[in-house]
Image (cartoon, rainbow, N blue to C red):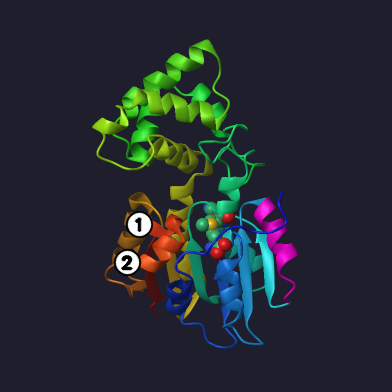
Amino acid sequence: MTSGTIHTPVLPVEAIEALQITSGATIVDGTAGGGGHVQRMLARVGPSGRVIAIDRDPDAVERLRARFSDPRVQFFENNYADLPELLDEIGLRSVDGILLDLGLSSDQLADRQRGFSFESDGPLDLRFDPRRGEPAYRLINRLSSEHLADLIYQYGEERLSRRIARAIVARRQEKPIDTATELAEIVRRAYPPASKRGEKIAPATRTFQALRIAVNDELKALETALRRFPEIMETDGKLAIISFHSLEDRQVKQAFRDDERYEALTRKPIRPNEAEIIDNPRSRSAKLRVARRLS
Ligand SMILES: C[S@@+](CC[C@H](N)C(=O)[O-])C[C@H]1O[C@@H](n2cnc3c(N)ncnc32)[C@H](O)[C@@H]1O
């Protein structure tokens, strides 16, 4: 594990503005990662304010604890979906604002032992919390071709899911698939050549996204959070969510529109400006939506 973070926060100004933090407020960062947003929250909550910072990844939490020595912030290794239980444990009934910045951090991407990057030769794990659930290499060596294809189609919105699933099954009949590089190569070969593709993204992008969503049960966590967060938000409290793909953005948009406890404050999502995209290319697909808790 590295001691520092290499993660650049996405929409740093817009996300913090969206929370409309006042002095003395209690704010939750449900996906604290490298702590970029936490730092900006601390600058806003004033001397009597408080930040509750959560991440599922034990390495991230260890790095965060080493980075911050401010008594106004507490760090927890938790799933943000379990925030109501966590608040209960620490004796808090409600909070004034919550931020979720979904997906993975650059620190996780750079850790070659975790399989997030296509170039990593360590195990294809893809779990945020490596102590819980099933690593992706087990899943792809276990599921039937149909099940794999459905998963890659549903969570990766990948049109070539059947072809990719067949290629995975053919390969694993020779030997189990262990690493991210192996999987990226299988997907690349299942794809038409780059010259025949209109898209710029790497062939393995959607397949990796699908497996990551599956092993971390990411859509379930978001759905649970959207349903439960109003229970622990103060009236007029803000919920800001940054998502990176349409499956998540759709869920957020629908909840903010259909759940009568929310009032959507963003009709269209807030996107990073060009300068941010140049400075931090990872931000290019980010969408920020914000809602207010109605009484
Ligand atoms: C994009 S990063 C957040 C970066 C952070 N905002 C910053 O400024 O450094 C997303 C983080 O969310 C964490 N995460 C993903 N799903 C989670 C969940 N259900 N509960 C808690 N943390 C989660 C990941 O481990 C990762 O560290």
> Few, some or many C-alpha atoms within 10 Å of disc 1 (few <14, some 14-19, many ≥20)?
some
Residue 17, how many percent across, how many down? 45, 79
Residue 269, numbered circle: 2
Front label number (1 vs 2): 2
Identify the magenta region. 59-70
User: What amino acid does circle 2 point to?
Assistant: Pro
Of helix, strand and loop, which one carries label 2?
Answer: loop
Q: Residue at x 68, y 51 (%)?
A: 59
Q: What secondary structure predominates along the stretch shown in magenta?
A: helix
Instruction: Determine which quarter of the picture holds residue 287.
Output: bottom left
Q: Earlier in the sequence, mark 1 or mark 2?
A: 1
Q: Tell me how many marks there are.
A: 2
- Foreground: 26 or 173? 173
Residue 223 magenta: no
Ligand 1 is in which quadrant of the figure? bottom right
Of helix, strand and loop, which one carries label 1?
Answer: helix
For the C terminus, give its image quadrant: bottom left
Residue 107, numbered circle: none
- Foreground: 222 or 200? 200
Residue 197, how many percent across, how many down? 26, 34
Q: 67 left or right of 138?
A: right
User: Above or below — where is 151 with respect to 86?
Assistant: above
Q: Is residue 195 visible?
A: yes
Instruction: Determine which quarter of the picture holds residue 249.
Output: bottom left
Tell me whether the residue at label 1 lies in contact with that at label 2, contact meaning CB atoms closer than 8 angstroms: yes
Residue 292, how many percent across, how many down? 39, 76
Residue indicated by mark 1: 249
